[in-house]
Amino acid sequence: MRITMIGTGYVGLVSGTCFSDFGHEVICVDKDATKIARLEAGIMPIYEPGLDALVESNVRAGRLSFTTDLAPAVAAADVVFIAVGTPSRRGDGHADLSYVFAATREIAAAISGPTVVVTKSTVPVGTGDEVERIIREVAPNARAWAVSNPEFLREGAAIEDFKRPDRIVVGTDDEIARAMMGEVYRPLSLSQAPLLFTGRRTSELIKYAANAFLATKIGFINEMADLCEMVGADVKDVSRGIGLDNRIGSKFLHAGPGYGGSCFPKDTLALLKTAEDFQSPVRIVEAVVQANDARKRAMGRKVIKAMGGDARGATITLLGLTFKPNTDDMRDAPSLAIVQALQDAGAHVRAYDPEGMDQARALLPDVEFAADPYAAAEGADALVIATEWDAFRALDLQRIAMLLARPLLVDLRNIYPAAEVERAGLAYHGVGRPQHEPAAEVEMVPMLRGAA
Ligand code: UDX
């Protein structure tokens, strides 16, 4: 298949590269000439584990190329993916579709043979109808079909998610488009990934419903964490205890400082707007959004409380700034609200992040950046783990205890057992965990074989 990917952001670049790795011929298009030149030179615009090597091998094999020239790339394609940004529109939270529609117009003007135009960007319900309408308006005689095919890639694990998806969702009622999308995803359906064909609007909604549901799981366990702190229970055990029930599932039940990133905050807001437009309230999602916003700020107060209630003049070190590990993405990262709260309380904030510091520098001008976790800890009054990078899982805690001016670890990702930290001479504050209670063990009850 000849595939053209419009947009070399996160989704476009990962998807285009993975499609080429499956043997398709892929051209990635972007208006940003510098980005394209850098990609051609093998320089990635984002940090994603394994992406540079995959790009390089597919470029070398002649299956993957980059260009700023949209028209010839579209004319040559069987399938064109739109993977441009859909940021939250300033002021009203609606998804800004101007890039999607502008791309659609350019694509429509360039289509030559039968072409499937696929929206991969996360777009509100009904966007595919408008994409179809624009194509018909610009190119009334074109044989083209507008299809929805949302992505479910997690940053930091995007290649793995693309190659081993839980499912692929394709929204179209057209038989030809369906057959062509079947071809595009054949390498994955051969390896048993369920390919779910639905109506276009249904497919568009599935994306929002999936992200809102996952955000709800996180919001739920975060509230349970608060309750655990009040009643003296351990949220990690609550997560295990409920997650082992297959109907609930154990994933996305890690309590923490609230969700961030490029998807959950934006997509939950966009879903609220759609619900409002169609006068069909989604009160649960509304509550999740509010609780998550409040939680990020509350985490700053939690740190100050752990310090005895006063942070004026103190130096507080944050380990981890990105919204999650294995990315350099700072979008809607809880650390932003935490830093703000700490600075508002009169603290000096120091930070270290393995990949996010370049992006963070622009967003957090008053933060002092350190070269490594130990330099960051030196002389500080508290150490806060804000992102669960693997590099923070095996810190020399005794060394940290010696370096800190006050031995306090606030672990907002619950990566350390309290006892281990306390043995190293540090006071420990996790999220939703009592200070001194042994963790419950899961008892494996042996199956009874045969009659008693
Ligand atoms: C998410 C979806 O998982 C993906 O399917 C979608 O297409 C894009 O949005 P991503 O934003 O990359 O992916 O990260 P994800 O791993 O889902 O984490 C999102 C946020 O939730 C992070 O801030 C993370 O720290 C937080 N989170 C996640 C929790 O606080 N607890 C959890 O149990 C899981």
Image (cartoon, helix red, strand yellow):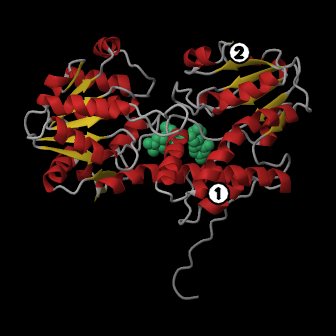
The quadrant holding residue 284 is: bottom right
In the image, residue 237 sits, relative to residue 303, either above or below, namely below
Which of the two residues, 220 or 385, is positioned nearer the viewer here?
220
Q: Residue 22's x, y, as percent? A: 23, 37
Residue under label 1: 240
Q: Who's the residue at 37% across and 31% down the image?
A: 98
Q: Residue 421's x, y, as percent? A: 79, 35
- Whichever of callouts 2 and 1 sits on the residue coming sooner in the sequence is 1
- What element does badge 2 sit on? loop
For marks 2 and 1, give the one nearer the viewer.
2
Q: How crowded is mark 2: few (under 14 residues within 10 Å), some or many (20 or more)?
A: some
Q: Is residue 195 visible?
A: yes
Residue under label 2: 367
Q: How crowded is mark 1: few (under 14 residues within 10 Å), some or many (20 or more)?
A: some
Could you tell whether 300 is left or right of 64 in the image?
Answer: right
Which of the two residues, 334 or 374, is positioned nearer the viewer here?
334
Could you tell whether 185 is left or right of 258 in the image?
Answer: left
